[in-house]
Each structure stands twice: as structure tokens, then as C-alpha cells.
Amino acid sequence: MDSAKVREFVSGMWDDSIIPELCEYIKIPNKSPLFDPDWEKNGYMDEAVALMERWCRSQPIKGMKVEVARLPGRTPLLFCEIPGDSEDTVLLYGHLDKQPEFSGWRDGLEPWKPVIRDGKLYGRGGADDGYAVFGSLTAIRALQEQGIPHSRCVVIIEACEESGSEDLPYYMEALEERIGKPSLVICLDAECGNYDQLWCTTSLRGNLVGTLKAQVLTEGVHSGAGSGICASSFRVIRQVLDRVEDSATGDTLVPELEPKIPEQRLQQAKAAAEVLGDMVYKKLPYSGNTRPVKTDIVELLLNNTWRSTLSVTGADGIPAMGNAGNTLRPYTSLKLSFRLPPTSDPAAAAAAVKKIVETDPPQGADVEFKVESAMGGWHAPEVAQWLEDSMHAASREFFGANAMYMGTGGSIPFMGMLGEKFPGVQFLITGLLGPNSNAHGPNEFLHIDKGKKVTMCVSQVLADHYLHFSS
């Protein structure tokens, strides 16, 4: 493979085709069904799918078939089949649904307004995960432009990932024969420790989401008349939370949520800590004198990628400040999001949390934990030598540094599904979500140079995959 030609082709595709398409994609508020229950009526998801479908059909890739699969009542799925020079199959994955707007965007930046500043494309969904289909097909085209053989490729772009990929299993079943049995999965929807090398995700945490409600009254009463007689619902819910989390350290207290971290992952975390240093915590937009929860970089990485954590992501029953009278409120509800260790059983974790918070509630209050979703994590199989060599070679060629391994704190439900469905399949899970890229939050951006180089690396891995499986 002529690396110089790959650089020239991929860079040109990003500048002349991919970035303009992503700008149009960012303008579409195609929020995932969890955040837009009327997505089908509103039509934004179909608009985003149509944009990507048009672009895919315009690509001169030999023998490629492009279609939008639609199952009744399910979000659509973009499906591309590319015949190869061998029958071994590579599955390339991404998603096109988006998180909601969020607040706090800087002056001149908005979620549905594409803005390019300092080599970064700002706007919701560009980095998470609009670029995936463009990068995947461009990597394949880069090989075909040079007449370099590659294996059969299948590209799947779902529209429900930010809602837990609940529609994806139905498509996997419906398309099972056409997908085949991949020997390599490439996922372009992951984090990277920095923008200076290829990063390979080795694990993903699961996610347990539910609503915790503590109710003490049937209606609100004057706080002067009721306080001191009836416990506040906020105090009850604080006590209940103390059963599942140490409020001083943030450590969870539920045995079913505790991980056993493999020695190899410990060593990889140490290696990543040496490369990243204090960037591990300095990448976050702290307020005032806020400090990270620990000073040890390795421990922070393990906290974020292997240990369970609890975030309170929403509240109900608490009026806004302007409407807050002197009232003892009848109830407090909190949306809880537990990040689960990669190897934990999500059903067991959900059952354990529910039992702990609901049993013997303080002052006999009505306490309920309603589980909304419980998704397992994922732990990568041992990397095959050919893939490890290929990733390092690609990273050195296009970034000038070796590839690095790191767990990821978030979830990609599809990876767990594939790991169960295709035992022994190899994974390259990588992406552009590096320091300050802020997917899900304000000021999300796509690092354009990183996007180009990751695409180049995927081309190299596809070429090496063919060589390995055809020899």
C-alpha cells in the first residue's frame, strides 16, 4: 500500500466531501427515540438517513449495494454490502442518532449549527457518530483506488444507539444471512486518550438507569406546620442513596457492582497513564477549585473504565427556584445512572440495587426504584497478533506513534451483542472522541485531522486483514 497516496486520497475526501456532508448532517436535529418519542412523525431521522444514503450511493465502490432496512415500529438502519477479494467478512459499525441539545454552548456555537474553528467541526453528532459511515467507505475506497485487495465488507449504521440499541437485535436477526460471520469488527464510535495516535478500546462499561422515588405525603404542606413531624422526602432519598454509594468517596457499596480487574488491563492502564499524564483529569471543564476524586492517574483511569459509578442525571418533585415556596414537598424523584463494570451482570446489578434501596425504607416512606434499562458492558477478547501488529504499524505510519490500549467509560451495546453472537471475532474499536470533544454535552466537536488519520489507519487494517486471511 502506498501510504502517501492513502494520505492524499483520504485527506481530499474529508476536505471536499465528508466535511460538507457532516455540516449538513449536524443541522438535522435527529435525536434518538429516547429523547424524541415522536421521531417518526417529526421526520428528522429519515432526513439524516436519506442524507447518508445519497452519499453512499454516490461512492464509486465496486459492486456495493446500499439500502435502508425498515422494520415496522423500529428506527431505520443503513446497510451496505461490498464484495471483496475473499469471502472473509469485516463488519464496520456506527450510528447516526444523536443526543439532545444540552445547554452551555459557547458564544457562536449551537448544537444544530456547524462551525469550523481551529481544525475542529463543532455541532451535535459530528463526532458521535456521524462520521462513521463516511470514514468506513472512504477507507475502503482508498484501497480500491490503488487496486489493493480487501475482504468482503458489511457496513451497519443504526439509528437507536443513544437509546440503548434496542432496535438493533431485530435487524441483526433479520439480516443474519446477509451479514454472515465476520472475522473482524471495526467500530468507529469510541473515545481516544489523545489526538496523537490510534487508540484501541479494550472494554466498555455497562449502564443501569432507573428512577428512585421517595414519597412521604400525598400532597405538599406548609413547611412550618409539617417539618419536624414528617421527614422530608429529600432526607429520605439521601439516606437511601447512602446505602448504594459512599458520599465521601463516590465508591459504590453494592457487591454485584464490584469488578475483578484483569492483570492485563491493569498493565494497560499504567501504560496509558504514562502517556496521558494529568490530561486524564485536566480534560474536564472543572469549576473553580474543584479537584479530581483521586490524585493517582492509574486509579482515575480504572475508576472511569472498570469500576462502577453513580451519577444523578435528573430530578423531579423539586420546583425551580422561582417557584419554590415554604412547602414540605410530598416526594423527590431522582434519575440514577450507574456505570457498570465491563464484566458485571446487569440484571443481577439491577435486582441488587432495587432490593437495597426499597427494603426497610427510612420512616416507612414509600420508596421505589423503577429500572428503565440495564445493559451489560463488554470485555474484548485477546487481540490476535496480526491485528496488534497492524494497529501499531498503522498508528506509526499515519500518526508517528504506537497504538495504545484503553478501556472506555461509556457503553456501545452493539459490541456486547456481537461478542455473544460471534465468539472469537476480533475487534478494532476506535474513534475521535478525545479530550474536550464533549459528546453529549455542550460544544461537541470533531477533530478533523484525527478523523483523517483514523480513516487512514482503517485502510491499513483492512489491507492487513485480507493478507492474513488469504494467506
Image (spheres, helix red, strand yellow):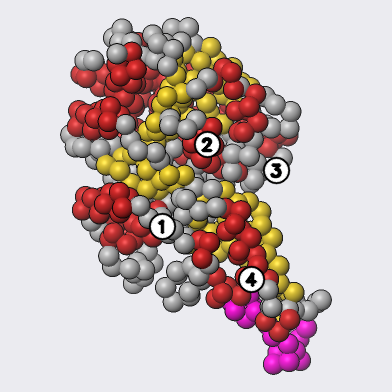
Viewed as shown, does residue 12 lie left or right of 333? left
**Where residue 3 appears, x then y in whole percent?**
22, 19
Q: Which residue is mark 4?
A: 357
Q: Quadrant of residue 313?
A: bottom right
Q: Is residue 434 left or right of residue 420?
A: left
Residue at point 57%, 24% (across, down): 78
Q: Which residue is mark 3?
A: 37
Which residues fall within the magenta stretch? 221-239
Alpha carbon separation for disc pair 1 and 4: 24 Å
Query: Which amino acid type is marked by label 1?
Result: Lys
Gap between marks 1 and 3, in whole Å? 38 Å
Mark 2 lies on a secondary structure that is helix
Find numbered disc 1 in the image and state the secondary structure of the residue it sits on.
loop
Q: Is residue 45 above or below residue 152?
A: below
Give the number of the mark in front: 2 or 4. 2
Label 2 with label 1: CB-CB less than 8 Å: no
Circle nearer the viewer, 3 or 2? 2
Q: Which residue is mark 2?
A: 420
